Amino acid sequence: MTTDFSISRRQMVERQIKGRGVSDPLVLDAMLKVPRHLFVEEALQNQAYGDFPLPIGEKQTISQPYMVALMTESLQLGGGEKVLEIGTGSGYQAAVLAQIASRVYTVERFPALARRARRVIDSLHYNNVNIKVDDGTLGWESEAPFDGIVVTAGAPSVPESLPDQLAPGGRLIVPVGTYGAQVLKRITRKEKGSLEEDLLDCRFVPLIGKHGWNDRQG
């Protein structure tokens, strides 16, 4: 028997996302359309629309729905942009972005997670998502510039390679702080310099790599 998750998904959007102030219609529509339950293990599917992150293996998580929506809205996409995601994880955030952006590039350091994300994304026919296994803190220089970059793990500081990969007017969303607690920042590239804003306190798994934490820290 197949469970119909559409009611749970609509309740998630109305209560957790719209109810907390996310109002961008493109984001709300994307969150309504992407079947979040397919991005977690079958045993956890009944919890997929809850107001919390869930484990996906490799000590990683699928982010809380509200956080996915907020980070997507903070990119201020109008549709048709080219977006980079650092930390593919389950592939859910990339799928939400794929509903809005014309091209999504996403980098994952765990091959097993990248393979699973690829399978789910392909099964849903998101043909505008490119995934590679690499050190995400380096970005994806060969495909730059990007209109938006979203980092789905907490960094000790803004990874130095990422702002340079933004197009003029492009926005970088990144959690910055300690290993266990961060502030979500938005950095907008201007003609001269950049504008940095603090959005809210948050907690993400650590961003591992050359311009993040290393495996021995914590």
Image: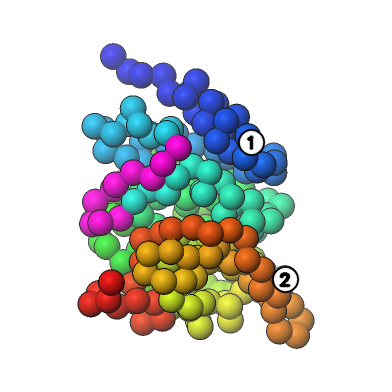
Check the picture and name the quadrant holding the N terminus: top left
Q: Residues within 10 Å of mark 1 (few under 14, many from 20)?
A: some
Q: Tell me where residue 82 appears, x and y as whole percent.
A: 60, 62
Disc 1, SS: helix
Res 86 quadrant in image? bottom left
**Residue on which the image places disc 2:** 169
**Residue on which the image places disc 1:** 18
* Structure colour scheme: rainbow
Pointers 2 and 1 in contact (C-beta within 8 Å): no
Q: Residue at x 43, y 32 (%)?
A: 49
- Residue 152 lies, with reference to residue 25, above or below; the image says below
Q: Nearer the viewer, residue 64 or 38?
A: 64
Q: Residue at x 33, y 44 (%)?
A: 54
Q: Tell me where residue 41 appears, x and y as whole percent.
A: 26, 38
Check the picture and name the quadrant holding the C terminus: bottom left
Q: Of the residues shown, which amino acid type is indicated by label 2?
A: Gly
Res 169 quadrant in image? bottom right
| Tag nearer the camera, 2 or 1 | 1
Q: Of the residues shown, which amino acid type is indicated by label 1?
A: Lys
Q: Nearer the viewer, residue 139 or 181?
A: 181
Is residue 134 among the parts visible in the rendering? no
Name the residue at the top extreme.
1
* Residue range of the region highlighted in magenta in the rendering: 51-60
Is residue 66 among the parts visible in the rendering? yes
Res 213 quadrant in image? bottom left
Q: Residue at x 66, y 68 (%)?
A: 197
Which mark, residue 159? none
